[in-house]
Image (tube, grey):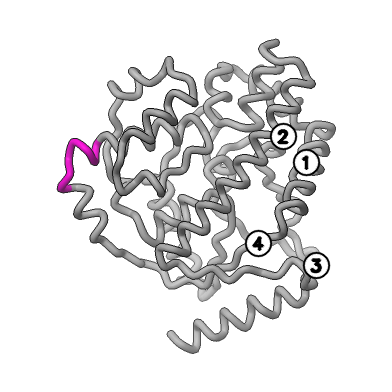
Amino acid sequence: MDSRQVYRKMDVGTGKDLDEYQVGGKAIPYHLIDILDAGEKYNISLFKKDFQQEYQKIIHQNQVPIACGGTGFYFYALLKSQGYTEIPVNEKLRESLEDKTNEELRTDLIQLETSYLDLADTSTRKRLIRAIEISTYLIRHPETEKLISEASSFEYSPVIFGLNPPSEIRRERISRRLSYRLKNGLIEEVESLLKSGLEPEQLIYYGLEYKYITEYLTSVLTYEEMAKKLETEIHRFSKRQMTFFRKMEKDGIAINWLDHLHSEEENIQQIIQAYNLLTQTN
């Protein structure tokens, strides 16, 4: 359920950790990872179609699908607000926004008061522009906003679990993870993508690691500036993610938060019990 893990050769920066998809020497099947080349376009509408296809395959094999991630809005779009994803692309509007800074884009979005404002994922420039695009469309077509607001289309009946350690622990883990990645292949990964023929703007489009390391490799930032800005932005992104998940709860999507003080075995038992209860109820 990740908007960047779909891309091949974007491994370290997206945290694929595919070496962990092994248990007792047995490979765990995974889906919607490495399905596109870096630089290709992917969106929520395509994701929904791909997810549905893989979901049906797993169900027909009498297996239990586990959706893991990642991108909060992908979860939300599957469970609640599917109508927004069908709003068409407005290339002319996108071109008019291209030269604006991210802060200017955020200001523009705030001024567009629609039902989508509190739902919008603005963690990257691409998503920020898409949020403006959706909000602009809703203002011009108020009947669409009414229909979407009234819609409630739960195609799936999931049991959802979330990780929510205290903020100081989360911040420490993020900083430690970033430090490790910078020393173990992240910069080389971005450099390799640039050498493969991708333009800097294409990588900057993906935000966070790919944006700031590209700016470092193209001499826009020093290493120290890059590392500091990137760490700050990842912390901000994490905070926005948690805000988004709280919004999901307010909209009626129940999340079972796993206690960070519990052992892995205790959390596994909690997950199994909740899943068994769901299957018995259904």
Which quarter of the picture shows residue 15? top right
Residue under label 1: 175
Of the numbered discs 3 and 2, the one sitting upstream in the chain is 3
Amino acid at dot 2: Glu
Give the quarter of the figure containing the C terminus. Answer: bottom left
Quick check: is 150 in the magenta stretch?
A: no
What amino acid is at disc 1?
Ser
Left or right: 147, with 85 as reference point: left
Segment colored magenta: 137-143
Residue 181 placement: quadrant: top right
Q: Look at 25% across and 61% down and name the residue there.
A: 151
Q: Distance between the residues labelled 1 and 2?
A: 7 Å
Residue that numbered label 3 is attached to? 24
Image location (x, y in percent) of residue 107: 41, 29
Which of labels 3 and 1 is toward the front?
1
Q: Which mark is residue 231?
A: 2
Q: Are marks 3 and 1 in contact (CB under 8 Å)?
A: no
Chief SS of the magenta region: helix
Q: Nearer the viewer, mark 3 or mark 2?
A: 2
Please name the residue that numbered disc 4 is placed on: 163
